Every structure is written in structure tokens, then in C-alpha cells.
Amino acid sequence: MKILQNIQLLPYNSFRTKAVAKLFAAPETTAELSDILNSYNDNEILIIGKGNDLFFTKDFEGLVIKPEIKGIRVLNETTDHVDIEAGAAEDWDEFVQFCVEKGFSGIENLSLIPGTVGASPVQNIGAYGAEVGNVISVVHTLDKETGAPKIFNNAECGFGYRNSVFKRTCKYVITSVVFRLEKSFKYIEKYADLNHELQNNPTPDLDQVREAVIRIRQRKLPDTATLPNAGSFFKNPVLSEDEKLALLRILPEAPMFVVGDQKYKTSAAYLIDKAGLKGKREGMVGIFEGHSLVIVNYGTENGLDIVRFMNGVQKSVYDLFGVRLEPEVWIY
Ligand SMILES: Cc1cc2nc3c(=O)[nH]c(=O)nc-3n(C[C@H](O)[C@H](O)[C@H](O)COP(=O)(O)OP(=O)(O)OC[C@H]3O[C@@H](n4cnc5c(N)ncnc54)[C@H](O)[C@@H]3O)c2cc1C
């Protein structure tokens, strides 16, 4: 297996920041990946997909692995559902399109999320009322330190809001994911924006739902090809009862969703809006005019500029509302 040296990572992150990886590998099979993990375990190892949820602030002194394991296959099919496995390197949206064309439902609301199948369980990607963790049955992985295989069933994945065991531990390389999708489809209203987009079509088919999601996303989100970004930069904060009451004293209209026993999720975008930061720009970094949760890069190749801007946003929101925004994006 070829291990490359001194590889520029700018093309491998959607924020387009510069950093050099000391070592770089793109294994195409599980066996190759396992060999590399085994042979290079005295190096720091970073796994990347398409780099839509991460950026770099400095050179990486270890081994960057970009799995190139591909393939889609139906494992099992009944009259009701299908178990379908996709390799980690499959493009996420192409996989969604493939499933929608076959009439398999369950991931259509996650259309156009940029990235790979392998990254999808890591932060339990979600959009328009759907989360991928609800349709994942099995995740195949290799242990990052030993290269040994380990299979996770759904419960073992520990899915939560933008979270999973893979994100919490960073111990496993995902090689493929098995999804259980339904063969029948009935649109269920779950999310206001999507319902609104479909208001003239109360009984959309799968393809129409996918198209509606794509239309909304193309209107709302900047294209990484022209305006580098990593989607939602911050997680929606989860507050305790006391924190909720304190915020509502300052911002009585702040959105609050119950997410657990005395736990409430509020909207990071709302707080950024209320702090007057929408559209704010400092140097080559700013908040996208059309969406307060998206930080965009207007031309820097230095990830530290993005970190400085992030710190400023966090400080403003904390000083005004006492809420600490945590990045959803990985910063290396
Ligand atoms: C414009 C835009 C819109 C977005 N919208 C959404 C959205 O609506 N909902 C949402 O949830 N996310 C969204 N995102 C974030 C991003 O698309 C997802 O997190 C996606 O899953 C990232 O895939 P990737 O292949 O680019 O992962 P990367 O950015 O390469 O990696 C992300 C993380 O996963 C790990 N990882 C990647 N591959 C593997 C693997 N095979 N095994 C183990 N770990 C791995 C990496 O180490 C890293 O920690 C958006 C991003 C952009 C740029």
C-alpha cells in the first residue's frame, strides 16, 4: 500500500484551509486499511471523508487516512424493507439518490448533505426532522489502533443529537454502514420548512420529497465550491432548567425544545441573530448573510483566522446571553 508524504490538505477540507499531512494514505479495501492501521500505529492517525465537517489550523504530524472503500449491495429484502450496505467512501447524496430511485425510504430528508457514507454515523447526520441513526442497523469498523474488525449494532452506536460512540471515542474507522430502509412511503409532516415547501402537494412521493429538500437547501446554504464553509458551525445548545430560565429572562421569545429530563435545546442561529452577528465579517471570515449558523471563508487559507472569528462569536453570545456555543465542526 502506498503511503504518500507531505500532502497538502487544502483540497481535502471544505473550508479550504492549508495544512500539510506528514503521511497520507487512501486504502481501497478493508484489508489494506487494516494493514496500514497495524503498521503505522505509532503515528497519530486522522480519518477523513470529504472534509465537509472539519478544517485545519496547523500541519498534521501523523498519518491522514482517507478510506476509499466503495460498493453498494442489498443484503436482504422482504416485502416491507430492505437491508442495504454501502462502503464508507460512497458519496452520501449519490447514495440517497440511488435509494430514492429504487423506492427505498428513510433517508430522503437527508438529501444533499455533503460528505461520505462513512462519516454519516459519526455525528449522526440530521436534517428536516430526520436523523441517520434511526435507519442504521449495523456499522462495520476497524479498531484504529490494531486494525481488528468490530461490528456495532444500532444500540451500540450510542446515537444522540449530532453524536455517537464513534464521535465520542474516535477509536474506530468505519468501513461500511448497513441501513434498513422501507419499501413503502407515506409522507409524514415533521418539519415546518419542508411542509411549507410541499404545501401544494400534501401527498408527495419519495422523489418529490427529495427534490423539495434539495430546493430548500440550495436556497438557504452557500455552495462550498464558491464560498468555502462547513455547514452549521455551532451545535444548538442544550440547557439545564436554570440556564433555560436565565435565557428566557433576557430573550423571552427564545425557541426551547424539550430534549430530555429538564434539558432544553435552544437555537444557536437565533442567539447569533439576536447578537446582531448575521452577515458580520472580519477580514476574510464572516457569518453567511442567509444563515446565521454558517461561518464562511471569503479567502483565507489560515484556519486560525476562522478560530479567531469563532472565538469572537462565542464571546459575544456568551457576554450577551450567558450561553456557550460549542462548535459542531472538527478543528485540527
Ligand atoms: C454546506 C454544508 C451543509 C451541511 N449540512 C448538514 C446537515 O444538514 N446536517 C448534518 O448533520 N451535517 C451537515 N453538514 C456537515 C457534514 O456534511 C456532515 O458532517 C458529513 O457527514 C461530513 O462528511 P465528510 O465525509 O465530509 O466527513 P469529514 O468532514 O471528512 O469527517 C467528519 C468527521 O468524521 C470522521 N470520519 C470521516 N470518515 C470516517 C470514517 N470512515 N470512519 C471514522 N470516522 C470518520 C472524521 O474523522 C471527522 O471527525 C453540512 C456541511 C456543509 C459543508
Image (cartoon, rainbow, N blue to C red):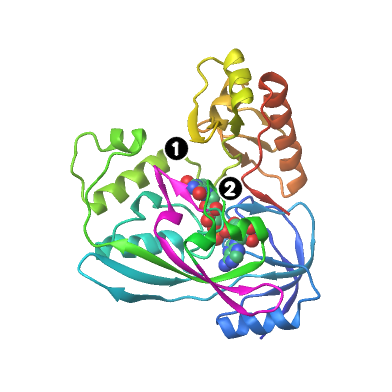
For marks 1 and 2, the one nearer the N-term is 1
**Pointer 1: residues within 10 angstroms few (<14), some, or many (20+)?**
few
- Give the residues drawn in magenta, as a range: 124-152
State the image quarter where residue 266 is shown: top right
Task: Let me know if residue 132 is in the magenta part.
Answer: yes
* Vertical comparison of 7 with 290: above or below: below
Q: Is residue 272 magenta?
A: no
Q: Residue at x 64, y 27 (%)?
A: 280
Snapshot quadrant of residue 322: top right
Amino acid type at mark 2: Ala
**Residue 211 position (above or below residue 101):** above
Give the numbered dot on residue 220: 1
Q: Which residue is mark 2?
A: 230
Q: Position of residue 147 (x, y in %)?
A: 66, 79
Q: Residue 238 placed where, x, y %?
A: 58, 35
Total labels drawn: 2
Residue located at (50% from left, 26% from top) = 256
Ligand 1 is within 8 Å of the C-beta of the residue at disc 2 = yes
